[in-house]
Amino acid sequence: MIRVLVVDDHQLVRTGFRVILEIEEDIEVIGEASDGAQAVDLAASARPDVVLMDVEMPGVDGLEATRRIVAADAAASVLILTTFDRDDYLFAALEAGASGFLLKNGTPEALIDAVRVVARGDALLAPEITRRVIATFTKPGAATRTNGARLSELTPREYEVLVLLAGGATNAEIAAALLLGEATVKTHVSRVLAKLGVRDRTQAVVFAYEHGVVRPRG
């Protein structure tokens, strides 16, 4: 079972997400929180697999709550819910260690899929958000926020894995493309993240676009 903590300051939103998620046989909502402080406490006591996190909440907001949850439990997967009005929220959440971003106007199917994706340790960016991230990091004169020399630490195989990862490939798809076992790919991905100094696949995608490893299509 995938154990989910739903965090939102609106009761109707929390109830709606609970109804959508608990229809699925492999997902269980183990708690609800109405603000970030409560979310941090519940995450520490209940140890959910996925925290579905709103951003704008009274008191401790979703960004600060994400920082605290991830700092306390590096294995925690936080899936941010956003209306995508503020780019600064998006990048602050990336830096806080969020594993994924989902638009609130998405479909129930997208929510369910997103929960499953981050629960298995992968990262997820909604297509609209991916385009915004890419646009930000490929603007002329965009600031480079990390040391591009880290790329030189990658082996040729790890670089190939990074390219495929940045293109949105799953471990299974990377394995098929490079004729490797999934366990081997998982090891390569872990080494790529460690060498780049990023927490997860989402941050690796940002790094890849920021440093020109891959370019936007079109």
Image (cartoon, rainbow, N blue to C red):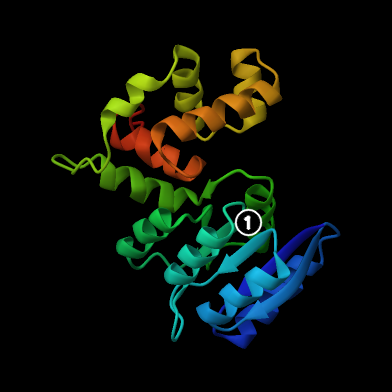
The residue lying at 66 percent from left, 15 percent from top is: 180
Residue 215 screen position, x and y as percent: 33, 30
> In the image, 145: left or right of 128?
left
In the image, 64 versus 170, the foreground residue is 64
Dot 1 alpha-carbon crowd within 10 angstroms: few under 14, some 14 to 19, many 20 or more: some
Q: Quadrant of the N terminus?
A: bottom right
Q: Residue at x 56, y 60 (%)?
A: 79
Quadrant placement of the C terminus: top left
Question: Against 132, is 177 above or below?
Answer: above
Q: Residue at x 51, y 40 (%)?
A: 201
Q: Is residue 29 left or right of residue 101?
A: right
- Decide if residue 108 is on the left or right side of residue 205: right
Q: Position of residue 212 (x, y in %)?
A: 29, 29
Residue 137 horizontal/vertical position (percent):
27, 43
Is 188 above or below relative to 204?
above
Q: Residue at position x 43%, y 41% from top?
A: 198
Q: Amino acid at mark 1?
A: Ala
Residue 60 seen: yes
Task: Look at mark 1 in the image and give the residue it sits on.
Answer: 110
Query: In the rendered image, is residue 167 in sight?
Result: no
Is 170 located above or below residue 124 in the figure? above
Mark 1 element type = helix
Residue furthest to the front in view is 72
Please identify the residue farthest to the left as the structure is shown.
Answer: 141
Query: Which is more toward the observer, 217 or 67?
Result: 67
The correct choice, above or below, for 204 with respect to 97 in the image is above
71 lies left or right of 136: right
| Total numbered circles | 1
